[in-house]
């Protein structure tokens, strides 16, 4: 498998995941806030994260059965069908039918991610992981540009049906590179297993020395960030901005600048080493939220919001690349899909917890207090994570690269 094909395949697969995620996390909260829903009600959309939290339950089954190509094509075609079904939904008739359809969509995407992540871990070596995670996060962010920016603009100018027909078309385009995938063996190496053996195997992976400690590290590194992230779309609406302006600011410009952050994050993990990347990115991310604190105090106006969006897009993506690189380092290639899916599920689990916490705090005390709490927790979490990673136990593969000056 050539390096250029690896890059093309990963870009297409992760872009396909970012596309619906961008719509449901960037565009839909804006639409609901404009319709008069409270921040706490909007936070209920985190129900859609549930398949991403629970996907570790069926990760082993996907990891050891079938073939990578068959799974990927099946899930990608199912995503296209889900988008076409969502095109027939009518949001004016209530949110329940739409959320049910979106939940099915989310389950398909989460399952596809198990195979994609496992494939990435297996086909990348240590030196490639930092740069490859830049591709992973950058492609995902580009999908978010399409979902949260382009599709929100399409919705503002047309209607719900046209928006999801466009999504289906973009997902179909992203399927093309998978058609050329020649690797058709089982998703992970090893003998076939019964359902009971898969469950036992998953528990054994969870109890591997250092895994639970690493799970806590993921939570600490992400919690403060997720408290802030859920509030940004509704915050812009409450600042008097319209849908098209938000689509340009957050969905297009914010996500586009995050591509630059993915490049910087990948270079940092590759050239300066994992420890430097995690520490520098985490501290910078916490500092970037102070711009939103100032804006919430009524200072700076739209200009400051633009500056905050650009900085948050760049630095937030750097921190994501640093964390995802650690997750690949900690995954055992023999159990690639299972290990990385466990870590990714934990990343997603932090989202709803942080989102509900931030939304409830903002409803009760205002945006400034919620942004301040998120910034403080993000900084404290980063410093604690670095200290924890400096000492054992951590996964053996991660220990090999953690303190190296370079990857």
Image (spheres, helix red, strand yellow):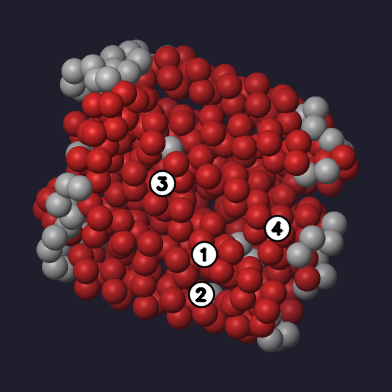
**Mark 4 nearby-residue class (10 Å; few <14, some 14–19, many ≥20):** many
- Name the residue carrying label 4: 42
Residue 245 visible in the displayed image? no
Residue 401 in percent (x, y) is at 15, 54
Check whether the beta carbons of the residues at disc 2 and disc 3 lie within 8 A of each other: no
Location of residue 232 with respect to 262 vertically, above or below: below
Residue 368 in percent (x, y) is at 63, 82
Task: Using the rendered view, name the quadrant where residue 197 is placed.
Answer: top left
Question: Sequence-wise, which precedes: disc 2 or disc 3?
Answer: 3
**In the displayed structure, does residue 399 sit left or right of residue 377?**
left
**Mark 1 nearby-residue class (10 Å; few <14, some 14–19, many ≥20):** many
Check whether the beta carbons of the residues at disc 2 and disc 1 lie within 8 A of each other: yes
Question: Sequence-wise, which precedes: disc 1 or disc 4?
Answer: 4
Which is nearer the eye, 297 or 302?
297
- Name the residue carrying label 1: 354
Res 374 label: 2
Check whether the beta carbons of the residues at disc 4 and disc 3 lie within 8 A of each other: no
**In the displayed structure, does residue 139 sit left or right of residue 131?**
right
Residue 232 visible in the displayed image? yes
**In the displayed structure, does residue 135 sit left or right of residue 174?**
left
Q: What residue do we see at 35% from left, 59% from top?
A: 218
Residue 209 in percent (x, y) is at 14, 52
Which is nearer the eye, 344 or 319?
344
Real-space Cα separation, disc 3 to disc 1, in angstroms: 14 Å
Q: Secondary structure at mark 3?
A: helix
Check whether the beta carbons of the residues at disc 1 and disc 4 lie within 8 A of each other: no
- Name the residue carrying label 3: 345
């Amino acid at each position: 498998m050539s390096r250029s094909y690896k890059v093309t395949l990963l870009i297409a697969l992760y872009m396909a995941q970012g596309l619906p995620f961008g719509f449901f996390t960037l565009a839909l909260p804006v639409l609901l806030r404009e319709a008069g829903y409270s921040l706490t009600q909007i936070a209920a959309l985190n129900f859609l994260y549930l398949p991403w939290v629970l996907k570790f339950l069926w990760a082993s089954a996907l990891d050891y059965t079938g073939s990578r190509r068959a799974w990927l094509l099946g899930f990608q075609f199912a995503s296209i069908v889900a988008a076409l079904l969502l095109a027939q939904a009518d949001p004016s008739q209530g949110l329940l039918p739409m959320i049910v359809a979106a939940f099915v969509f989310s389950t398909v995407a989460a399952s596809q991610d198990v195979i994609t992540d496992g494939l990435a871990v297996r086909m990348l070596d240590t030196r490639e992981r930092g740069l490859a995670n830049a591709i992973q996060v950058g492609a995902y962010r580009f999908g978010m540009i399409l979902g949260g920016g382009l599709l929100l603009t399409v919705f503002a100018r047309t209607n719900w049906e046209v928006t999801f027909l466009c999504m289906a078309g973009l997902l179909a385009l992203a399927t093309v590179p998978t058609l050329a995938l020649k690797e058709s063996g089982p998703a992970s190496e090893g003998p076939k297993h019964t359902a009971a053996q898969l469950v036992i195997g998953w528990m054994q992976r969870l109890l591997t020395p250092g895994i639970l400690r690493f799970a806590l590290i993921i939570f600490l590194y992400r919690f403060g960030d997720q408290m802030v992230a859920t509030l940004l779309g509704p915050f812009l609406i409450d600042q008097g901005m319209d849908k098209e302006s938000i689509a340009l600011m957050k969905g297009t410009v914010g996500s586009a600048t995050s591509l630059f952050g993915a490049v910087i994050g990948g270079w940092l993990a590759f050239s300066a080493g994992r420890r430097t990347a995690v520490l520098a990115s985490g501290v910078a991310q916490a500092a970037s939220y102070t711009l939103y604190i100032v804006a919430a105090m009524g200072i700076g106006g739209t200009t400051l919001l633009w500056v905050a969006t650009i900085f948050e897009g760049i630095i937030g993506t750097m921190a994501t690349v640093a964390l995802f690189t650690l997750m690949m380092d900690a995954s055992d290639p023999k159990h690639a899909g299972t290990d990385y899916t466990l870590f990714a599920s934990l990343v997603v689990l932090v989202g709803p917890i942080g989102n509900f916490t931030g939304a409830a705090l903002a409803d009760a005390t205002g945006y400034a207090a919620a942004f301040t709490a998120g910034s403080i927790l993000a900084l404290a979490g980063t410093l604690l994570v670095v200290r924890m990673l400096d000492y054992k136990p951590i996964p053996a593969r991660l220990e090999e690269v953690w303190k190296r000056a370079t990857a």
